[in-house]
Image: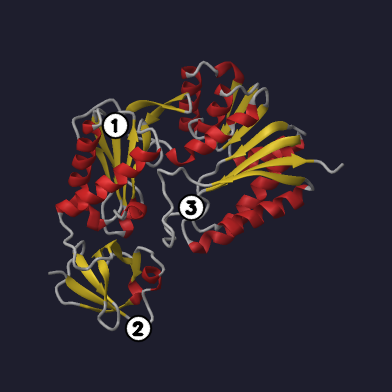
Amino acid sequence: MNKTITLKKGEGRVLAAKGSWVFDNEIETYEEGILNGEIVTILAHNGFPLGQGFINTNSKIRIRLLTRDSSKEVDEAFIRSQTLRAYTYRKDLMDLHSCRLIFGEADFLPGFIVDKFDTVLVVQSLALGMEAFKGIIVDELTQLLKADGIIVSGVFERSDAKVREYEGLEKVKGFISEPFDTQVQIIENGVKFIVDVKDGQKTGFFLDQKFNRLAIHKLVKDKSVLDCFTHTGSFGLNAAVAGASSVTAIDISQSAIDQATLNAKLNHVEDKMSFLVEDVFEALPKLVQKQAHYDVVILDPPSFAKSREALKNALKGYRDINTQAIKLVSDQGYLVTASCTSFVTPDLFKEAIEKAAKDAHRRIRQVEYRTQSFDHPVLWGDESTPYLKFYIFQVIDEQ
């Protein structure tokens, strides 16, 4: 039987709202002998059971919920069942060539991520309690894919995120399977990419924008495109392959631009693409000063805030880059703009863009609002799962 923790009276608001976390300041008492990583039963202040999760006293997120059923045994069979449910969801909805198979809390496997790139799985274990289940999840996914005729040729672990340190864990990176070539080719929306699963950002590629990148295809034919924060060229290459007349791609990372250049050659669009290694915050004002204009300007920056304390600066950053981008869009051209900062709510992002349009003295007309790809599902009530905001606007001059 699990040991128990008891919440303070009036606490457990996140759990009550269907969230997945219990924070350190919400707990009244701990049963003696509880070990970090252990499964515990969560009790309300009156002793009513609220569910089971694993505990870690090194983290402000003290408990991550696994199930609201306090009578269910959290064992290998339970973890395999949760993995099956996550896999079936993806199988029902999308092509499994390259996608996120496990998305942490949204799949009731908190702090655990598995991305699939062609025949390779990339694993991120970001919470202490999931460490014991890593092998079980990988084995279950491998068996499920095999049953559907999909072979897994290798598994690589990218548990090298800084968040591991908050859990009292060391960073880990390396092969779980036998070694293999970690430069993996995938195809997304008809575009070929080489994904560096060993040294690329996060797990090597940002799968969450897959269908948003597809959404720009209809905008870009015979258009000039400026792709900011291009990383390895994902939006820019989608634009080039979809028929853009020219694409200028900017990123501060030389290694990212090197990879983007190789990806352009892989897709035979290198003649219409040019690359610039520069800080976007510095590059955009220079382009405005030169009175440059583009038919489509794309902003897909990394997260601007890792904590709520950084929110004010993040909002200023979004306002600044969107102001400059709007100035660069030709009349009746398009602004494509995104935020992956979880602390920036949809309303705050919308407000930042509204202020940017006002600062730029331009009118914007919303074409489309989107969020993350459905292999990164949003679990309603769980504030840790929604994070991506994505807009397409037409920029119009007053008549």
> Which structural element holds mark 2?
loop
Image location (x, y in percent) of residue 305: 51, 55
Tell me if residue 176 can be seen. Answer: no
What is the quadrant of the N terminus in the image? bottom left
Image location (x, y in percent) of residue 202: 39, 42
Q: Which mark is residue 9?
A: 2
Label 1: few (<14), some or many (≥20) within 10 Å? many
Give the alpha-carbon distance from disc 2 to disc 1, as whole Å: 47 Å
Colouring scheme, one of rainbow, by chain, secondary structure, one colour: secondary structure
Label 3: few (<14), some or many (≥20) within 10 Å? some
Give the alpha-carbon distance from disc 3 to disc 2, as whole Å: 30 Å
In the figure, 176 relative to 126: above or below? above
In the figure, 217 relative to 26: above or below? above
Disc 2 marks a residue whose amino acid type is Lys
Tell me the residue at 60%/54% (across/down). Answer: 349
Disc 1 marks a residue whose amino acid type is Val
Which residue occupies the extreme right position in the image?
399
In primary-sequence order, the first of circles 3 and 1 is 1
The residue indicated by pointer 1 is: 120
The residue indicated by pointer 3 is: 387
What is the quadrant of the C terminus in the image? top right
Tell me if residue 212 can be seen. Answer: yes
Q: Quadrant of residue 5?
A: bottom left
In primary-sequence order, the first of circles 3 and 2 is 2
In primary-sequence order, the first of circles 2 and 1 is 2
> Which structural element holds mark 3?
loop
Give the alpha-carbon distance from disc 3 to disc 1, as whole Å: 26 Å
Left or right: 42, with 375 as reference point: left
Image location (x, y in percent) of residue 396: 78, 41
Label 2: few (<14), some or many (≥20) within 10 Å? few
Left or right: 166, with 155 as reference point: right
